[in-house]
Structures are given as C-alpha cells and as structure tokens.
Amino acid sequence: MDFVRLFHAENPIAGPVEPRVHEVRDEIHRTGTYTHTPGELAFGAQVAWRNSSRCIGRLYWHSLRVRDRRWVNTAEGVAAECVNHLREAAPRRRIRPTITVFAPDRPGLPGPRIWNEQLIRYAGYAMDDGSVVGDPRYVNFTTMVRKLGWLGGPGTPFDVLPLLVSAGDGQPQMFTMPGDAVLEVPLSHPTHPWFEELGLRWHAVPAISNMCLEIGGIHYRAAPFNGWYMGTEIGARNFADTDRYDLMPVVAHHLGLDTRSDRSLWRDQALLEINVAVLHSFEQAGVTMTDHHTESGRFLAHLKREEKAGRVCPADWSWIVPPMSGSTTPVFHRYYDEAELSPNFAHHPDSLERGLGQGTVT
C-alpha cells in the first residue's frame, strides 16, 4: 500500500489512489500476490535506483529505460533477453541506463534468476603455480562453471564468462555470450606508448545482474540493470586492487618508479596513470564514461534536488566517496542519511556455490 500511494503521489496523472488500493487488495486476497501496471513497474524500478545508497550516479534516475519482460520465465528466454539488453544499452557506443525486468516471484512459483554478478565478467583461471590468468575475483565462479561443463575460453586474461541462469527452482543452465553483445574498449595512454602493449581492455556496459529488485513487496529476482562506468571503477578497483588484476607494480615498473619504499608514493603515481589511460581510452573509443570529479558534483546536485522535493536521499559514505583522490571531491566532506528505503535492490541471501547439481551448456 505504501508503494501504491507513493506512485500516485508522484504521478498525479494516474488518477485517484483509492480505486487502485482496493484493486490491489482484492487481487492479493484472491491470488496471494498482485501485478504491477506498466507504469508502476517503470516508476518502481526508477525509484529503486533513486534509493540505492551505494550509487553515486543517481542524478538521472528518472531516465532509466525499463524493458518489461515479465512474461519471460525460462532460462533460455532470460539469456536471450540479457543479450538483447546489452545490445540495446549501448547504441552507437552511447550507454543508456537500462533495466530488464523478468517474471517475478509468485506464491509457490519463484521467478528466474541470473547467477552472474554482472552480465559481462572475465574468467579467472587458477594455475598450478598459484598464479591466476584473468580476474582473481572469479576463480571460484570459473572453476564451478567448468565443473558444470564450460570448456573455458582461449585462456587470455579477458575471457568472457558464460551466463548462468535458472528458471524457478530448476538447475542453472549456461549460455555463451555472443561476441557482438560484448562491447569492449582496448586501453592505451595519451603519453605512454608502452601502455597499449600491456594488452589491456575492459567491457563497456556494467550490467549488475545478481540483485533482486523489490517493488511494493513484489520480488523480481532477475532484473539486470546498468548505468555507465565511472573511470575509477575500472582504473582504481578492477585493475588496481591487489585481489583483482593488481596492475600497479607492473605500471610502476614501466614508469621507472622506485617501488622499494612506500614513501616514494609509487602506488599513487601508478594509480593515476592507470586511470588516465582508462578515461583516455573510453573517450577515444567514443564510449560513455564519467570521471570521479564530475560525478561527485552531479551527486551533490541530485542530493539538493531530493532535499528540495522533501525526500530522504540515502547514501553510504564508503561507497559514494571515490576510491582515489577522495578528499579532492566534494562528496568527501559531509555525512549522509543511511536509511533503507523501498523500492530498492537487494542481494540474494544464498550463495551459488551451495550444492549445485549438473547444469547444461548452451
């Protein structure tokens, strides 16, 4: 009822709320659940983004494009629409905030689920000597999908993992991601030619796919969504974290930095050049990306809009402040509300690694 009233309060064109309240209550009494109208679904998904306390890029929450695919509840159908999502989210390399919403949970009938953290992620191959080729974060996931039948990719540091999708309580099925759905950007540096020789690249559409969209008590377990990247997500985390690609020592060596002492600040210099390369490369490729200074200013503009509208704007300081040069951005120097609002996105409580049976490969 809170959600229905919120929808009508912010969308006067929807008309008086009480008839809809009675309609929803009657449907719940008859079926144990209710069905969102297309308008309610779109609004709910947008407000879930508005309420996402860990996202700095919420200024454009109202522009979220909602792909209503609630009639899709098979693993094959979900996989096909995930591919379409990626194709439609980056027309002419310009990233559009997009969400695809699949069939919801219903009494006695769970909706489909995507087990990948993002639609595009890179495999991590554990070598016998303890090293990892690819992304160390996904070693366990890679090992698991290989046990389920995935033959693996060419063995490069950037092999795209297959999609793992389950329908209801069924076993997960695997689907190879077609190459034309994976927009990638090769990395180079504006002043260091050797950077291109490192052979680095990253995918352009950050589509989170393992979170549950909750709107007015209805759970959409499969609802992949994307905005566009902020450069530091790639340059200061994916490439720089010691448990990810850990590129700072490599870049420092090429820069000729003294890595024997932390006081030389070699990590800071290497980190800066990695991030310069990421921003430069996406700009050269014509792919949408923002930097952490610009996005920090946009977030404060969003905060002011929300305050003016009389709404709470929840924010997790540890996620809103960028992972490099934090104190040089305006979001660093203040506190935020940490309310848990609905609609919202939530992590599933269980884990994929918990006793899966044999899946099938497509």
Image (cartoon, rainbow, N blue to C red):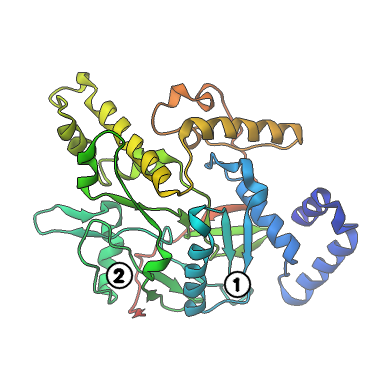
Report x, y in % for residue 27.
79, 72
Viewed as shown, does residue 222 lie left or right of 323? right
Q: Which quarter of the picture shows residue 45?
A: bottom right
Q: Residue at x 19, y 40 (%)?
A: 194
Q: Residues within 10 Å of mark 1 (few under 14, many from 20)?
A: many
Left or right of 247, for residue 127:
left
Q: Is residue 216 visible?
A: no
Dividing the picture into quarters, in which one does residue 69 lie?
Answer: bottom right
Marks 1 and 2, how far apart in space? 25 Å
Residue 249 falls left or right of residue 332: left
* Quadrant containing the N terminus in the rendered view: bottom right
Whether the residues at callouts 1 and 2 have beta carbons within 8 Å, the answer is no
Which label's residue is closer to the chain start, 1 or 2? 1
Q: Using the rendered image of the protein, determine whether residue 235 is visible from the camera's viewpoint.
A: yes
Residue 221 lies, with reference to residue 57, above or below; the image says below
Would you identify the image quadrant in which residue 121 lies?
Answer: bottom left
Q: Nearer the viewer, residue 339 or 319?
A: 319
Q: Position of residue 293 (x, y in %)?
A: 49, 30
The count of marks equals: 2
Identify the residue under disc 1: 103
Say what amino acid the circle numbered 1 marks.
Ala
Q: Secondary structure at mark 2?
A: helix
**Where does the C terminus fall, quadrant-wise?**
bottom left
Residue farthest along the top direction in this orientation:
263
What x and y, as percent, mark residue 115? 42, 65
Callout 1 secondary element? loop
Which residue is at a point 63% across and 61% down the rendered structure image?
66
Percent across and percent down for residue 50 are 64, 45
- Please name whichever residue, 98 or 335, is drawn nearer the observer in this view of the structure: 98
Mark linked to residue 145: 2
Residue 216, above or below 114: above
In the image, is residue 62 above or below residue 1? Answer: above
